[in-house]
């Protein structure tokens, strides 16, 4: 594998994990080589640089098959916190919607928990609104989940 397109790196932690001798090129065109001591040797700098010196995204130059797989694996592992945050956000929105709908339904109920005959039209309208809101929310949730899964495929 010699393509640099498969080895896009978005964060310094992935650069830290690359083996010595790996050459990378950042978004500004600067090229650096990982040294045995873990720093990065960049032309024009007499000292080793940290991975956060580079302008991201960074690409591996002439990656080996093993390096390309390492970059893919590390990139996916780094996405887990972002994915979990998005999933928690989705679940929170669903819980908020459910609580609001429950409160709206409870406003229609009498002291016995029943909906009086005089409020059945309101109940019917509320149930239609709930169904419409839930359908919209489900569509939005599915789009967000597909986005998370699709962006993690790496173009495969």
Image (tube, helix red, strand yellow):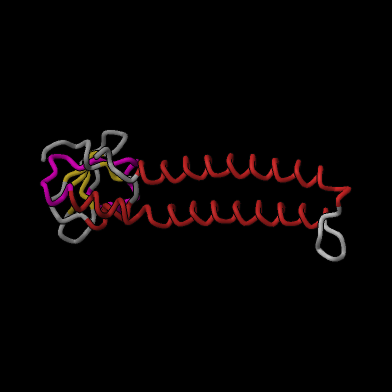
Please identify the quarter of the rendering in which residue 110 is found. Answer: bottom right
The image shows residue 135 at horizontal and vertical percentages of 58, 41
Where are the magenta residues, as a range? 46-68
Q: Residue furthest front?
A: 117
Horizontal relation, residue 101 to residue 115: left or right: left
**Quarter of the image where the N terminus is located:** top left
The front one of 131 and 59 is 131
In the orientation shown, which residue stands out farthest toward the bottom? Answer: 112
Instruction: Tell me residue 73's x, y (percent).
Output: 25, 54
Q: Is residue 19 left or right of residue 146?
A: left
Q: Is residue 95 visible?
A: yes
Give whichever of 35, 2 is nearer the camera: 2
The x and y percentages for residue 149 are 37, 46
Residue at 32% x, 52% y is 12
Assess whether residue 67 is covered by the magenta stretch: yes
In the picture, the quarter occupied by the C terminus is top left
The total number of labels drawn is: 0
Q: Is residue 90 above or below residue 7?
A: below
In the image, residue 88 lies at what x, y percent? 52, 57
Between 17 and 65, the residue placed more toward the observer is 65
Residue at the farthest top position: 29
Is residue 47 visible from the viewing direction of this image?
no
Residue at 41% across, 45% down: 148
**On screen, 49 above or below 155?**
below
Residue at the (79%, 57%) spot, across then down = 106
């Amino acid at each position: 594998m010699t393509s640099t397109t498969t080895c896009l790196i978005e964060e310094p932690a992935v650069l830290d994990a690359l083996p010595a001798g790996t050459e990378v090129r950042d978004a500004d065109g600067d090229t650096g080589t990982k040294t045995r001591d873990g720093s990065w040797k960049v032309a024009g700098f007499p000292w080793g640089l940290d991975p956060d010196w580079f302008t991201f995204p960074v690409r591996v130059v002439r990656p080996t098959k093993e390096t390309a797989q390492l970059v893919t694996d590390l990139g996916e592992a780094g996405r887990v916190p972002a994915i979990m945050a998005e999933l928690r956000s989705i679940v929170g929105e669903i819980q908020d919607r459910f609580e609001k709908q429950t409160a709206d339904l409870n406003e229609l109920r009498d002291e016995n928990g029943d909906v009086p005959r005089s409020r059945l039209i309101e109940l019917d309208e509320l149930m239609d609104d709930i169904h419409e809101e839930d359908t919209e929310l489900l569509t939005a949730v599915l789009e967000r989940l597909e986005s998370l899964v699709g962006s993690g495929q790496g173009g495969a």
